[in-house]
Amino acid sequence: MSHRKISVAVTFPIWPPRGGGQSRIFHLYRHLAETRPVEIICVTNANDLPSDREIAPGLREVRIPKSRAHRNAELELSHDVPGVPLADVAMPRLIHLTPDYGRALRASVADAGIAIASHPYLFPLLRELMDGPIWYEAHNVEMTLKRMMLPDTTTARELLAETERVERACCDGSERLIVCSADDGLAFRQNFGVPEARITEIPNGVDLDTVEYVGPEARQAAKGRLGLDGTATVVFLGSRHKPNCDALDAILRFAPECPDMRFLILGSVCKHSDGRPIPPNVGLMGEVDDGVKATTLGVADGALNPMMGGSGTNLKMLDYLAAGVPVISTRQGARGLAVADGVHLQLSEIDGFPDALRKLQAEIGGPVLAKRVAASRRLVEECYDWAALADRFGESIDRAGSRA
């Protein structure tokens, strides 16, 4: 069977993948591109250069910088919504100010068999330009997420109302919804009236070719080579995203209760700590490349996910589990994943994290922890391999095409 091109509309560039949304889009569509061409049409920053390049076999990323007018209008909106990135929620009202993006998207969908709005914000433009089927890939329930993130100002309330209208338009006008978790699917059914038959769950995954599993013995040996013996080290990964920022605030609060442990924070979430007092046992590594991330996950004694909000699933959890790092998470942080307390990880409320960390310290080097991390890796291999998830996605597209 010959497979027609897929065009995907995204409000941010995806290569190289750093945050969770970038990773999902890159890995899911690069595997899809093994059997059909895929074009990702991205909006990028006004000071970036336009580009059109193949970032994986069969997968093209087309970057269109925001116009100066688009950038200035976004900055004007931000005056009444301080401290919150507005690039996505402002996109429906501002994308017409970057006409080059509309031209690039029109050219892409002209010979596409299907178009996908990855996040809802470019769906209205896609609907204008695409006569054929459009799918909505919902990374989150945006209304839930943005209601938590946006402050109570006039502009923020307007943007929140627009977000609800756009998300509802996606639910009403798309042929199919792709959700990351069963909980999100339930929310779309209850809040937006989407029939269950139009929802497909494709959970977040992990690239098992690049995440090396490091078992307990190898982990302790690696710590020794780096001179890290004698101190338990735990890690938290996160982008500068409100749920991650709240989780970092929690870590900064409870880290002093564990003075004999080292806490390493990786990712752009570190910028959230600017101006805040940092406990002496917390190290902020900032954004790092894949090599540094892999080395850190290969020597960490534990990985934390003290999330208190958000929707979808956390890709960091899959990185942790695949790498063999023992995980301590809230139930919210583990949402949407087929994990069991005591089998694959420790579940704890935020107030219980210091006790959970002390329990983890006591388990290092023992059979209980070894059994838990082995079970975690098996779970990821069986349920969350990006290649297998992309196969499922492709089968859904093919079935829909055969019915057309």
Image (cartoon, helix red, strand yellow):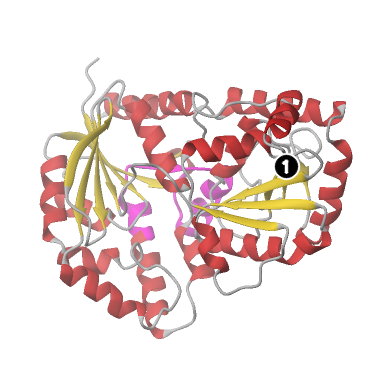
Could you tell me which secondary element the residue under label 1 belongs to? strand
Query: Can residue 201 be spotted in the picture?
Result: no
- Residue under numbered circle 1: 302
Nearer to me, 152 or 282 = 282
Find out whether residue 148 is within the magenta segment. Answer: no
Q: Residue at x 50, y 51 (%)?
A: 189
Residue 97: % across, % down: 16, 67
Residue 329: % across, % down: 71, 48
Nearer to me, 50 or 281 = 281
Q: Quadrant of residue 85?
A: bottom left
Q: Amino acid at mark 1?
A: Gly
Query: Can residue 36 be spotted in the picture?
Result: yes
Q: Is residue 295 left or right of residue 49?
A: right
Residue 209: % across, % down: 49, 23
Mark 1 is surrounded, within 10 Å at the Cα level, by few (under 14), some (14 to 19) or many (20 or more) other residues, namely many
Q: Quadrant of residue 112?
A: top left
Q: What range of the chain is rendered magenta?
A: 167-195
Q: Residue furthest top?
A: 1
Number of numbered discs overlaid on the protein picture = 1
Nearer to me, 297 or 52 = 297
Residue 344: % across, % down: 74, 34
Q: Is residue 185 left or right of residue 85?
A: right
Q: Residue at x 44, y 46 (%)?
A: 18
Q: Is residue 160 left or right of residue 219?
A: left
Q: Residue at x 66, y 47 (%)?
A: 235
Q: Quadrant of the N terminus?
A: top left
Q: Residue at x 47, y 23 (%)?
A: 388
Q: Main secondary structure of the magenta part?
A: helix
- 97 up-or-down from 310: above or below: below
